[in-house]
Image: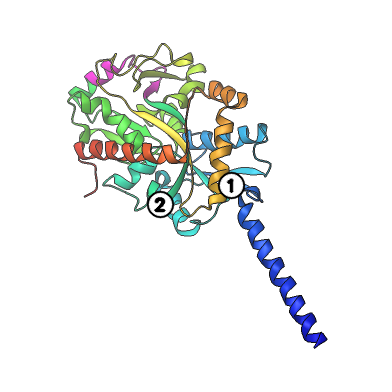
Amino acid sequence: MKVKGWKKILVGVVMASLLAGCGAAKGSSSEVYPEKPIVVVAPSGAGGGWDRTARTFTKVLGETKLVEQTMTVENKPGGGGTVFIADYVSNDSKNDYKLFAGSPPVLINNLKKEGNSPFGYKDTTPLAQLTKDYGSIVVRSDSKYDSLETLLEDLKKDPKKLTFAGGSGPGSMYHLVSILPAYKSGVDHKLIKYVSYDGTGEAMTALLGGNADVIATDASSVIEYLKAGKVRVLAVAAPERLDGELSDVPTMKESGVDAEFAIWRGIFGPKDMSKAALDFWNDTIQKMTESEEWKTAMDQSGWTSEYRNSEEFVKFLDEQNEQIKELLQAMDMAKE
C-alpha cells in the first residue's frame, strides 16, 4: 500500500510539473522568441533595393540592440524573386527564423501574365512596411538624352530604338516603370525592348557597360552613381520633387507625363508564423523605426520612412494589389 501510495504521489508530481511547464510556455511565449539566429533573405543579387533593405534592417536592429540574436542576410536571386518565394512557401511556412525583404514585385509577380508566380503576399505574413520610394528613369552621364522629353521624342519615332533594362523580369515592377512614360505618352509600349536582370546592381552594370541605353529603378538606388557622376536621372515618378541629391530631378508630371509609381519596401515572414514571433516583430519593428539609428539610416540611404504594422500593412497590400491588377490589365500584361 505504501509503494502504491508513493507511485501515485510521484505520478501526480510529474503531471503537475508537465502541466506547469506547458502553462509557463504558453503564457510566456513572447519572452522566448527569438532563441536562435535569424536569417533575412534578399530575393535578388547584391546592390538592389531588396538587398539594401535587408541589410539596413539587420544593421539597425543590431545597433539598437532590439534583437540580441545574430541576424544575417542571404541573397537568393532568381526570377525576380519568384524562385525564392516558391521555395519559401514550400519549405519555410512555419520557420519563424527566416524573414525576407519585399516590395511591389511580391504582388506583381503573382498577377502578371508572363513568368508569373503562383505565390503572393497572401502566402506569407506581412510584418511591416518600412519605407517608400519612387521609380526613376536613368541614363549614363554621357547619354545624348538630357530630359525625359527628348527620350520620348525618339521613342515616338521608333519604339524599338532603345534598350531598357531593369532589375526584375518582364511584366515586373521595373518593367512597368520602364514603359510607364511611353504608355502614358501614346507610344506603343509593347514594342519597347526590355532586358531583365537579377537586381538593380546588375542592371546598372549593364547600363554603365553600354549594354543598355536606359534603366528603370528606384530613385534611392541611383544616388551613389549620381554622386560619382556616372549617371543622369531624367525623371522620378513621384508626386513632387524629392529632397537631397535628387532635388534637381523633375517629376514625370513636370516632364509632361501624368504618371506616378510608388515603391514601398517591407519585411515578410512565413504564412504560419507563431503568435509569439508576430507579437515580437510588431513591437520590435515599431521601436526600430522610432529610433535615431533608423532615422540616420534613412538619411544615408535617401529613403523616406513609412511604417505600417502587420495589420495596417495587410490592408495596404490589399489595396495595392487591386491597383496593380488594373494597371497590368490596361497594359494587357495580367494573367487570365
Q: At which x and y percent is residue 49?
A: 47, 33
Label 1: which secondary element: strand
Q: Is residue 126 magenta?
A: no
Would you call the spot at circle 1 few (<14 residues within 10 Å), some (14-19), or many (20 or more)? some
Q: Is residue 146 magenta?
A: yes
Q: Looking at this rendering, what residue extends furthest in the right direction?
A: 2
Q: Which mark is residue 139?
A: none
Q: At which x and y percent is residue 15?
A: 69, 71
Q: Quadrant of residue 219?
A: top left
Q: At which x and y percent is residue 152?
A: 24, 20
- Write the residue at 28% across / 15% down: 255
Q: What residue does disc 2 label?
A: 123
Q: At which x and y percent is residue 101?
A: 49, 40
Residue 74 appears in the figure? no
Q: Which mark is residue 39?
A: 1
* Front-most of residues 287 and 71: 287
Query: Magenta stretch?
Result: 136-153
Q: Amino acid at mark 2?
A: Asp
